[in-house]
Amino acid sequence: PPDVNELGKSTWNFLHSMTAQYPKEPSPVQKTEMSNFLHLFSRVYPCNWCAKDFEKYLKENAPKVNSREELGRWMCEAHNSVNVKLRKEKFNCDFWEKRWREGWEE
Ligand code: FAD
């Protein structure tokens, strides 16, 4: 099975980068596609317990797909819920776009 940490790091990179390129004013089709994608993603993510918890998170916190800003923050908060579960530091979501659109190296 994949290394859960490596998989997680690269997947968050993908997910946050995806939100950073999401339209500021998405069309109805783009909103539906993003929402569908996130639900399907939670069904196929190749770490079972991660996927189960993410699916539960999605049920309790419907993805906010009305704009880039909304989706970026939603994803940041979803990532923070995993950070809390893993007892990692929470990320300040005011900086999500700086981190993932403008980019900084760690
Ligand atoms: P990561 O958490 O991978 O973060 C990568 C970078 O993202 C950080 O260095 C930071 O710059 C930035 N970042 C951190 N927090 C945020 C935020 N809130 N918003 C925006 N940017 C941020 N691992 C488990 O052991 N158990 C699980 O149940 C589990 N569930 C997961 C569910 C999903 C959907 C995903 C994608 C991953 C999951 N993981 C899980 C993996 C876990 O979240 C981490 O990816 C892994 O522990 C490696 O952590 P890391 O310290 O390298 O940084």
Image (cartoon, rainbow, N blue to C red):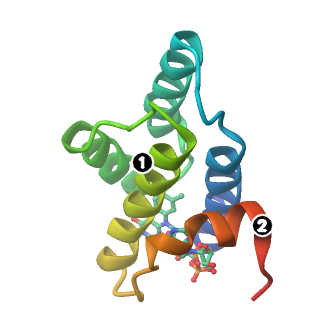
* Residue lying at 77% horizontally and 67% vertically, measured from the top left: 102
Residue 88, relative to residue 19: is it above or below? below
* Residue lying at 45% horizontally and 79% vertically, measured from the top left: 92
User: Residue 49, image x and y in percent?
Assistant: 37, 56
Circle 1 crowding by C-alpha within 10 Å: few under 14, some 14–19, many from 20: some
Quarter-wise, where is residue 89 in the image? bottom left
* Residue lying at 46% horizontally and 62% vertically, measured from the top left: 76
Q: Can you tell which of label 2 and label 1 is closer to the viewer?
A: 2
Mark 1: C-beta under 8 Å from nearest atom of ligand 1: yes
Q: What label sits on residue 84 in the rendered view?
A: none
* Residue lying at 75% horizontally and 89% vertically, measured from the top left: 106
Residue 45, relative to residue 105: is it above or below? above
Q: Which residue is labeled 1 in the image?
A: 51
Quarter-wise, where is residue 87 in the image? bottom left
| Front-lying residue, 4 or 56 | 56
Q: Secondary structure at mark 1?
A: helix
Q: Which residue is labeled 2 in the image?
A: 102
Marks 2 and 1 in Cβ contact (< 8 Å) = no
Mark with earlier residue (2, 1):
1
**Left or right: where 77 falls relative to 100:** left
Q: Amino acid at mark 1?
A: Ala
